[in-house]
Each structure stands twice: as structure tokens, then as C-alpha cells.
Image (cartoon, rainbow, N blue to C red):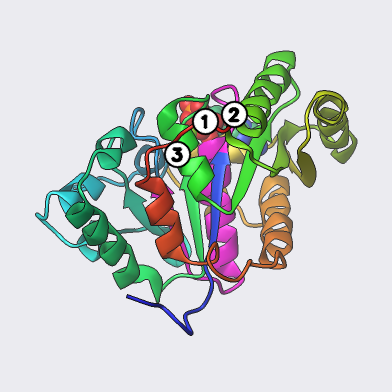
């Protein structure tokens, strides 16, 4: 099964060291912002532990990736429509189960993603916080890892711990850092500086700053209404930051073969992870 001539798909995993820093809000609103500039975006909810994306958007998915794996349904039937054309795939809890699939199931799930790949420019993966095997398998499968941090000592130290493991145990060469809930652009840069001073000193990894999202009451209001802030408060400060972020990410080059392809993402996802070195 080759996909020659297919448009390359950006696969972006959103993660953090510490929980509650805004990963799910970033994933959803970056997705909606990319939709608003004309990209076709699918959001894979890879954190079913707390059933994140569906709660945030008031969705009630009846099926998830597990039903695709068990052959009960097609991936296209699992996709839930979100705001502005965003498509949401509720994942099965535990890719550990996916890791233990046989070759036939592997081929099945790769085929399932291939079926919807032609409708997709960007795949965003919202993960749980921390460094579980499950999270790591999603991160290693993606082309781009966005680490969300906020201006709290524990958020920064936990982000460092996560980046250290990705670099030293899994040989990750680059991560992107997004500051969330900052009161000014300067605060965002300061958060990044605090992180990069230790990554530069102790690790051999590229850490790129991709900007900041303001602390914005509109985000909380949107969460309460189970809507996306970019969708319902498009002129709010946070929404403007998300639009700017979307335009920046849209300019990222997608590497050509093999990482540009969705199959590669799914194959890596299904390969048992092993620490390097
Ligand atoms: N830019 C922001 N301004 C104001 N509040 C925010 C902002 N970003 C996130 N929040 C608030 O922070 C809370 C946590 O956000 P979110 O659920 O996205 O975090 P998370 O990192 O996905 O959490 P978890 O680790 O539990 O998955 C939400 O209630 C949301 O209202
Ligand atoms: Mg979350």
C-alpha cells in the first residue's frame, strides 16, 4: 500500500510535564484556528483517562478507536464533528492495548487512518501529562512535539523532566515550547528562558519557542459553555494568540517521506517503544 502523491500531513502532539496547564484547550483551539485558515484538521483525543476533548466541547461520542480495532466499525464512523469543521477522533483508552495487536490489526488500523487521510492536512494529538509509556508512544509517533508550560515552578521543572527523558531515553532531537496563561508576551519569553537555560546546559536537544497564549477569562467562559474560545470569542486575546500560532504552524515545513505520512504515525504508534542507548 503506497501513498505516492498524497499530501503530506502534519502530525503535532500536544503534551506537558505537569497536568492542567491547558493542553486540551491548546489542542482544540489550535485545531479550530487552523480550520479557520482553511486547513482540514483532525484532533485525536489520546487522553481518555479523563475524557478530555469531548467534555470540553460537550460531545458525546458513542464509539472510539477501540471499536475500530475490534472491527465493529469504521474510523469514519467514529469521527465526531466539532466546531468550524474540526474532526475529533475519540481514542481508545490505553495504546498499550494497541501495542499488543497482531500484524493483521496493525494493517487494519493503518488502513483505517488511510481511509480518512485524504481528508486531512493536520493531525493534532492531545495527550495526557507526564511520561507514561502510552504518552511516549504518541509523542515518538508525531513529527512535532509541542510542550505546554505555564509560569509556575512545578510546570517548568516537570517540563524539563519530560524533555530530559524524551532526549536521553528516546533520542528526541527537538521539541517546541508554548507558554500558556501568561499575562504578557514578556512573561511568555521569561518562562521559555527559564526552561531553555537548563535544557541548553544539560541536554543535547533543540528547544524552540513558538509563542504564548494569554491568560484570558474568555477561555474559562468558553470551557463553561463547552465551546471553543476561538469559535465563540474570536476577537478575545487568547483567540488572537491561537490564530497567530496557527499561522505560524501552518508555515512549518512538513518533512517528506517517511515522516510526512500518516501511515508512519500509525505504524510508530503501534510499535512497542524501547528506550535508546
Ligand atoms: N489561556 C488560558 N486562560 C485562562 N484559562 C485557561 C487558559 N488555558 C487553560 N485554561 C484553564 O485551565 C484549565 C485546564 O485546562 P486544560 O483542561 O486544557 O488543561 P490540560 O493540560 O489539558 O489538563 P489535563 O492535564 O487534566 O489534561 C481549564 O479549566 C481552562 O479553563
Ligand atoms: Mg487535557
Kindly report the distance in space between the C-alpha atoms of the residues bearing marks 1 and 2: 5 Å
* Disc on the earlier residue, 3 or 2: 3
How packed mark 3 is, by other alpha carbons closer than 10 Å (few <14, some 14-19, many 20 or more), is many
How packed mark 2 is, by other alpha carbons closer than 10 Å (few <14, some 14-19, many 20 or more), is few
Q: Position of residue 127 (x, y in %)?
A: 47, 37
Secondary element at tag 1: loop
Residue at x 60% of width, y 30% of height: 277
> Is residue 26 part of the magenta span, yes or no?
yes
Residue labelled with disc 3: 137
> Is residue 6 part of the magenta span, yes or no?
no
Q: In this view, does 109 lie above or below 126?
A: below
Task: Find the residue positioned furthest to the top.
Answer: 154
Residue labelled with disc 1: 275
**Along the line of sight, the residue nearer the viewer: 25 or 95:** 95
Is residue 5 visible in the rendered image? The answer is yes
Task: Find the residue positioned furthest to the bottom.
Answer: 5
Residue at x 38% of width, y 55% of height: 266
Q: Is residue 267 left or right of residue 242?
A: left
Pointers 1 and 2 in contact (C-beta within 8 Å): yes
Residue at x 53% of width, y 66% of height: 258
Bounds of the magenta segment:
15-44
How packed mark 1 is, by other alpha carbons closer than 10 Å (few <14, some 14-19, many 20 or more), is few
Secondary element at tag 2: helix
Residue labelled with disc 2: 169
Displayed quadrant of residue 191: top right
Q: Is residue 82 left or right of residue 178?
A: left
Kindly report the distance in space between the C-alpha atoms of the residues bearing marks 1 and 3: 11 Å
**Along the line of sight, the residue nearer the viewer: 205 or 79:** 205
**Along the line of sight, the residue nearer the viewer: 218 or 45:** 45
Q: Position of residue 247 (x, y in %)?
A: 71, 64
Amino acid at each position: 500500500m503506497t501513498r505516492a502523491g498524497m499530501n503530506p500531513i502534519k502530525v503535532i502532539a500536544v503534551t506537558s510535564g505537569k497536568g492542567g496547564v491547558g493542553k486540551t484547550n491548546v489542542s482544540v483551539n489550535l485545531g479550530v484556528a487552523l480550520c479557520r485558515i482553511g486547513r482540514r484538521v483532525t484532533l485525536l483525543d489520546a487522553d481518555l483517562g479523563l475524557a478530555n476533548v469531548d467534555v470540553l466541547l460537550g460531545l458525546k461520542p458513542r464509539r472510539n478507536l477501540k471499536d475500530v480495532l475490534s472491527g465493529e466499525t469504521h474510523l469514519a464512523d467514529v469521527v465526531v464533528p466539532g466546531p468550524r469543521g474540526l474532526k475529533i477522533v475519540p481514542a481508545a483508552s490505553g495504546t498499550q492495548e494497541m501495542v499488543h495487536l497482531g500484524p493483521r490489526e496493525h494493517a487494519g488500523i493503518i488502513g483505517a487512518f488511510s481511509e480518512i487521510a485524504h481528508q486531512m492536512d493536520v493531525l493534532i494529538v492531545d495527550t495526557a501529562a507526564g511520561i507514561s509509556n502510552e504518552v511516549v508512544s504518541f509523542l515518538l509517533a508525531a513529527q512535532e512535539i509541542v510542550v505546554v508550560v505555564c509560569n509556575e515552578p512545578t510546570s517548568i521543572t516537570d517540563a524539563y523532566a519530560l524533555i530530559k527523558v524524551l532526549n536521553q531515553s528516546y533520542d528526541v532531537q527537538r521539541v517546541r515550547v508554548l507558554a500558556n496563561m501568561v499575562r504578557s508576551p514578556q512573561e511568555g519569553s521569561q518562562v521559555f528562558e527559564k526552561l531553555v537555560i537548563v535544557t541548553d546546559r544539560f541536554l543535547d536537544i533543540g528547544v524552540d519557542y513558538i509563542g504564548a497564549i494569554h491568560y484570558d477569562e474568555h477561555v474559562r467562559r468558553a470551557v463553561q459553555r463547552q465551546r471553543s474560545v476561538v469559535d465563540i470569542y474570536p476577537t478575545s486575546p487568547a483567540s488572537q494568540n491561537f490564530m497567530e500560532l496557527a499561522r505560524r504552524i501552518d508555515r512549518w515545513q512538513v518533512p517528506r517521506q517517511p515522516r510526512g505520512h500518516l501511515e508512519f504515525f500509525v505504524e510508530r504508534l503501534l510499535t512497542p517503544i524501547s528506550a535508546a542507548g
